[in-house]
Image (spheres, rainbow, N blue to C red):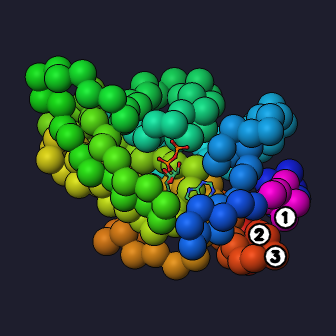
Amino acid sequence: MFKKLVSSLESCPMVQRGDYHYFIHPVSDGVPIVEPALLREVAVEMVRVLDFTGVKKIVVAEAMGIHIGVALSLITDIPLCIVRKRNYDLPGEVALHQSTGYSKGELYLNGIEAGDRVIIVDDVLSTGGTMKALLEGLAIAGAEVQDVLVVIKRGECDIGRPYKALVEIEVDESGVHVKDTFF
Ligand SMILES: O=P(O)(O)OC[C@H]1O[C@H](OP(=O)(O)OP(=O)(O)O)[C@H](O)[C@@H]1O
Ligand code: HPA
């Protein structure tokens, strides 16, 4: 379980983004290459641990939620809602402010109707800025969040509700250290 995810994390490179030790990994960056076996391992575990009760939509954020969301959507046949970094000005579009450990930007939520029961999946949870923005936007749109799952949890973070993670890591000058695997 998680063999490819753990070994690839422990050997992945890191760069500095200001004060932030940024690890570079296929799941969180799409580089250097996304191996199908790694993506399959992640997708299968996500299906195993998520609570899909009544879920009508999978919600992910551009960009690095997309490949894991697509994998999950293809397996479960649940439609995918991609929260974009570009606005479309469609009726009901919700604009959100996203802040991470190394960047700030806007996100735009479309395609959610009041009463939709959804799950949120993302590649990484670090400061929680992105996840909190998604939760806020979904609350504004009137969605019910059934479950939240991230592939990689980086340190401790309170997002105001329970969530699940496949692996927990710490990152320092020497690289990535896998602290725990879940489920
Ligand atoms: O918990 P946080 O501090 O918010 O960090 C996590 C977020 O950071 C990355 O997104 P980002 O928009 O930076 O990059 P991407 O476009 O490569 O997904 C990642 O995909 C998460 O969504
Ligand atoms: O260190 C990171 N690497 C890749 N994606 C991320 N998203 C938040 N932090 C990181």
User: Which residue type does callout 2 highlight?
Assistant: Val
What residue sits 51% from the left and 37% below the top?
Answer: 63
Q: Where is ligand 2, by quadrant? A: bottom right
Residue position marked by numbered label 2 in the rendering: 176
**Mark 3: which secondary structure?**
loop
**Quadrant of the drawing holding the C terminus:** bottom right
- Given residues 9 and 164, the one toward you in this image is 9
Indicate which disc residue 10 carries.
Answer: 1
Q: Residues within 10 Å of mark 3 (few under 14, many from 20)?
A: few
The residue beneath circle 3 is: 174
Q: Is residue 11 magenta?
A: yes
The tag earlier along the polypeptide, 1 or 3, is 1
Distance of label 1 from label 3 (alpha carbons): 11 Å
* Mark 2 or 3, closer to the camera: 3
The spot of residue 72 in percent (x, y) is 58, 34
Residue range in magenta is 8-13
Vertically, is 169 above or below 149? Answer: below
Helix or strand or loop: what does disc 1 sit on?
helix
The reply to whether the C-beta atoms of the residues labelled 1 and 2 are less than 8 Å apart is yes
Whether tag 2 and tag 3 are in contact, CB under 8 A, the answer is no
Decide which of 72, 67 is in the foreground and name it. Answer: 67
Residue that lies at the very extreme toward the front in this rendered image: 18
